[in-house]
Image (cartoon, helix red, strand yellow):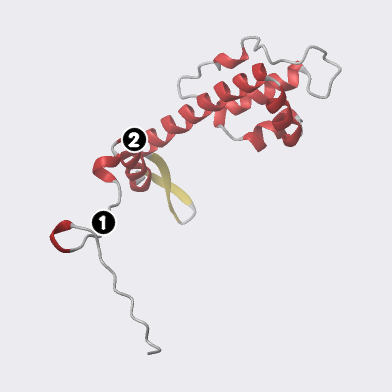
Amino acid sequence: MTSTNKKPRVLEAHPGAPKRSSTVLSSARVAVFLENLASYAHVSEAAKAAGLNRMALYKYKKDDAGFSQAWDDAYALGMEALEEEALRRANKGVKKAVYYKGRVVGHDRIYSDVLAMFMLKGAKPEKYRERHEHSGAGGGPVSFIIENSKE
């Protein structure tokens, strides 16, 4: 879930829930799948947690517009949670134990410069993207002359 422990909105009786509980994709299992997908946006792990076949879920998504929308909503929530966690790790860091002779003697706060850079590149690509620009004379196009070396 997100850092504020909000209940995923997608679990509010989505229209894509199967009608019969005797089916392999029961409403309860689909709800577990969507809850897990909303927590961490990982389809395979969410399917495993719900005890459902991933490929069956993809087929169900393709065949049922209501379930497809619930899936997309849950996935979006999971991606928001992932983004929140990346921002937290980049800005606030994580505590890491410091050991001496096998005992914890303190903690360091470790920040993720890599996560920070990815977040900056995503938020302001015009400023932080990697630039690979090639231009010819006067800023114009690059010209190539290909000579046949067999002559």
The x, y position of residue 26, in whole percent, is 78, 19
Q: Which residue is rendered at x = 26% and y = 41% of the image?
A: 126
Q: CA distance from mark 1 to mark 2?
A: 35 Å
Numbered disc 1: secondary structure: loop
The x, y position of residue 120, in whole percent, is 31, 40
Tell which circle, 1 or 2, labels the residue nearer the N-terminal end: 2
| Above or below, comparing residue 117 to residue 11 in the picture | below
Amino acid beneath label 2:
Lys
Q: Which residue is rendered at x = 43% and y = 32% of the image?
A: 83
Check whether the beta carbons of the residues at disc 1 and disc 2 lie within 8 A of each other. Answer: no
Mark 2, Cα crowd under 10 Å, few <14 / some 14-19 / many 20+, is: few
Q: Which residue is mark 2?
A: 92
Q: In the figure, is residue 5 to the left or right of 44?
A: left
Amino acid beneath label 1:
Glu
Numbered badge on residue 29: none
Q: Quadrant of residue 22?
A: top right
Q: Which residue is mark 1?
A: 133
The x, y position of residue 111, in whole percent, is 34, 43
Q: Nearer the viewer, residue 86 or 74?
A: 74
Q: In the figure, is residue 93 to the left or right of 51?
A: left
Q: Residue furthest bottom?
A: 151
Q: Nearer the viewer, residue 137 or 126?
A: 137
